[in-house]
């Protein structure tokens, strides 16, 4: 047994290494490592840039769709003229802004909102299968809409928006129950998801019973609402949806560093000064509000919230500071592309956007899963 | 730094009874402190009481005279770092990013070059530079442990708590990490408290050994040669043993066989 800590003895490897570390002696390879890390961060920005370009291209293409002929570049010129207050062609301006833009803005808001909600859910509940709907948001919205359509009962005393108001209020109930449960008992993320699923089934059952009593007209209206479409939202709807989603995205982005810490485990997070259960509650509420506002106005658009974060994670990694904005722009690009395809592929029949996102995203996701060797989630 | 633990008891719930009972200890000198003791005597529970992961059911923990109950978590995180027993990172990040999380309490928003330098230097210290861009989830349990230790090191706290940091390491890194912690405590005036199941490592490297026993109490705190002997090992662990002494008079335990088995 050697006396490896004796004074005057030859320093041990530990002492040498520790000496270098304490003197902040930078190895030659340091600048190379830092450059390499810089390139790794740069790639994340490139990915976001590409998503934005793709979204802009799809928006341009979508604006040309319709009977009134407006070309790709004309549509951007018209938007520019409108913004600068220099409207040249009033008809074209009306066509773009009254007819075609609401659908696109709805796509932007829903795509970004659902994707960011997905990131927040997966990171806070630490479950790769979590998405805005896992917490019962969709089941709640369905029940609310069904009550409005079938029973003609609306919670909010607003004429005309009975469906939307009901959907919004009811979609918040499952999250409220989850938050209450986690307050009452120190619930683990898994328990919270299970609670969400329990409420989801319960609400689903009530919805089914209500459907049994409803007449064919109500069923048809319900079916239309449930299918989900970006075309349902008007500028007035967007005036509610947009600020809620914008604030939600900003809040999640501001929390992204804390979400990174949370990914290392609740106890570890606490040792770094992050209160896991508070962060979880806050995120749940933000996600519920975002998802509720989107679902109530556009109906069910599945898949985006679940898969966008995973695809982006595979490409740029799990750092939430980048994952949040990148998922937002990727969600926008994916949803708008899906909507564009749905409207053109067998025109004039429109295929629902949710169907196309699944057709588009499913194989893409499978391909990425098979191609990528490294594991992004445990 | 001065840690005072005064009559601390902790229970996970009213139905489970106390895991640790009336723990008192006073650590006022820098050094490496090893907590040893059989399974289930509350070693992990105790160190989690030192950084507010667990809130003591009764009693107080003071750091430099201040009850930590009154110190916000964020400020505790600036004084105490913690290496959990096993890494459980959910979504995989490259090792650099996983270690950068330890800079959380120092960072505003962006990662600075200074943060990166600290991380790369620390990776080198732990011999994992070559893993820097590898995904955390691709690594082995031993490599996870080194990443977790690196994360705590870049947190730059005067107190560090480690829950079995050498459990999954090969023998070379077991002695390397243990010696590193000892030297680090001297060089940076740190109080480093680690839980260890390896009596010989605890004996060789720690300044003081904290021996815990059933039912969740401290049996003895003292220099390894005062705490680790045939009698205490046989009583506390229930295993027969022979004790040898190394060149510096530190006891080394050669285990025999189990003397009793729990019901």
Image: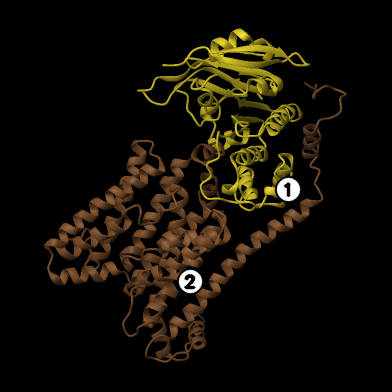
Chain colours: A brown, B yellow
SS type, badge 2: helix
User: Which x, y percent locates residue A355?
Assistant: 35, 70
Image vertical order of residue B150 relative to residue A144, above or below: above
The part of the image, by quadrant, that contains residue A154 is bottom left
Q: Which element type, helix, strand or loop, lies under badge 1?
A: helix
The tag on residue B117 is: 1
Image quadrant occupied by the N terminus of chain A: top right
Q: Residue at x 54, y 15 (%)?
A: B237
Which residue is depicted at the point 58% across and 67% down?
Answer: A47
Question: Quick check: A321 above or below A219?
Answer: above
Query: At which x and y percent is residue B185?
Result: 71, 27
For image coordinates 58% across by 70% down, the residue present is A49
Q: Which mark is residue A333?
A: 2
Residue B24 visible, this angle:
no
Out of A238 and B238, give the one closest to the viewer. Answer: B238
Subunit under mark 1:
B
Asked if marks 2 and 1 fall on the same chain, the answer is no
- As drawn, the label of residue B12 is none
């Amino acid at each position: 047994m050697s006396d490896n800590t004796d004074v005057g003895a030859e320093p041990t490897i530990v002492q040498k290494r520790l000496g270098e570390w304490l003197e902040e002696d930078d190895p030659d390879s340091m600048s190379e490592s830092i450059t390499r890390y810089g390139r790794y961060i740069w790639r994340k920005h490139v990915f976001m840039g590409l998503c934005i370009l793709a979204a802009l291209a799809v928006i341009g293409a979508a604006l040309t769709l319709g009977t009134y002929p407006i070309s790709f570049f004309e549509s951007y010129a018209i938007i520019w003229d409108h913004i600068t207050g220099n409207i040249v062609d009033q008809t074209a301006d009306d066509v773009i802004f009254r007819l075609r833009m609401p659908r696109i803005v709805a796509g932007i808001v829903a795509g970004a909102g659902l994707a960011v909600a997905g990131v927040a859910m997966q990171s806070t509940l630490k479950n790769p299968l979590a998405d805005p709907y896992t917490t019962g948001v969709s089941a709640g919205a369905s029940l609310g809409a069904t009550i409005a359509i079938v029973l003609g009962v609306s919670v909010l005393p607003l004429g005309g928006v009975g469906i939307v108001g009901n959907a919004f209020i009811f979609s918040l109930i499952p999250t409220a129950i989850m938050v209450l449960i986690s307050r009452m008992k120190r619930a683990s993320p898994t328990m919270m998801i299970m609670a969400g699923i329990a409420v989801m089934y319960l609400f689903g059952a009530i919805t089914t019973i209500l459907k049994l009593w409803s007449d064919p007209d109500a069923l048809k209206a319900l079916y239309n609402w449930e299918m989900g479409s970006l075309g349902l939202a008007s500028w007035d709807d967007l005036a509610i949806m947009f600020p809620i989603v914008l604030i939600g995205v900003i809040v999640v982005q501001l929390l992204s560093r804390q979400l990174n810490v949370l990914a290392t485990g609740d106890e570890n997070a606490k040792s770094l000064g992050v209160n896991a259960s508070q962060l979880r509650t806050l995120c749940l509420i933000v996600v519920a509000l975002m998802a509720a506002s989107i679902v109530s106005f556009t109906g069910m658009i599945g898949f985006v919230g679940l898969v966008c974060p995973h695809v982006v994670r595979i490409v740029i990694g799990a750092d939430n500071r980048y994952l949040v904005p990148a998922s937002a722009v990727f969600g926008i690009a994916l949803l708008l592309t899906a909507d564009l395809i749905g409207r053109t592929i067998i025109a004039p029949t429109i295929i629902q956007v949710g169907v196309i996102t699944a057709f588009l995203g499913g194989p893409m996701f499978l391909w990425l899963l098979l191609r990528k060797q490294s594991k992004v989630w445990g | 730094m001065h840690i005072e633990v005064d009559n601390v008891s902790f229970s996970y719930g009213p139905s489970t009874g106390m895991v640790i009972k009336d723990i008192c200890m006073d650590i006022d000198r820098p050094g490496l402190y090893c907590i040893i003791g059989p399974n289930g005597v509350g070693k992990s529970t105790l160190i989690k009481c030192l950084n507010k992961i667990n809130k003591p059911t009764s009693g107080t923990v003071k750091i430099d005279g201040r009850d930590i109950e009154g110190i916000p978590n964020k400020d505790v995180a600036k004084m105490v770092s913690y290496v959990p027993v096993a890494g459980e990172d959910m979504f995989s990040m490259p090792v650099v990013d996983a270690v950068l999380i330890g800079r959380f309490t120092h960072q505003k928003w962006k990662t600075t070059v200074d943060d990166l330098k600290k991380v790369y230097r620390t990776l080198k210290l732990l011999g994992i530079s070559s893993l820097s861009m590898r995904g955390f989830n691709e690594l082995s349990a031993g490599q996870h442990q080194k990443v977790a230790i690196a994360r705590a090191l870049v947190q730059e706290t005067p107190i560090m708590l480690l829950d079995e940091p050498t459990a999954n390491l090969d023998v070379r890194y077991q002695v390397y990490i243990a010696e590193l912690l000892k030297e680090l405590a001297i060089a940076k005036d740190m109080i480093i408290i680690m839980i260890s199941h390896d009596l010989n490592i605890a004996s060789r490297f720690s300044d003081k050994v904290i021996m815990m026993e059933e039912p969740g109490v401290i049996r003895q705190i003292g220099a390894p040669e005062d705490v680790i002997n045939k009698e205490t090992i046989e009583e506390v662990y229930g295993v027969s043993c022979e004790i040898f002494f190394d060149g510096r008079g530190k006891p080394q335990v050669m285990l025999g066989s189990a003397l009793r088995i729990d019901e």
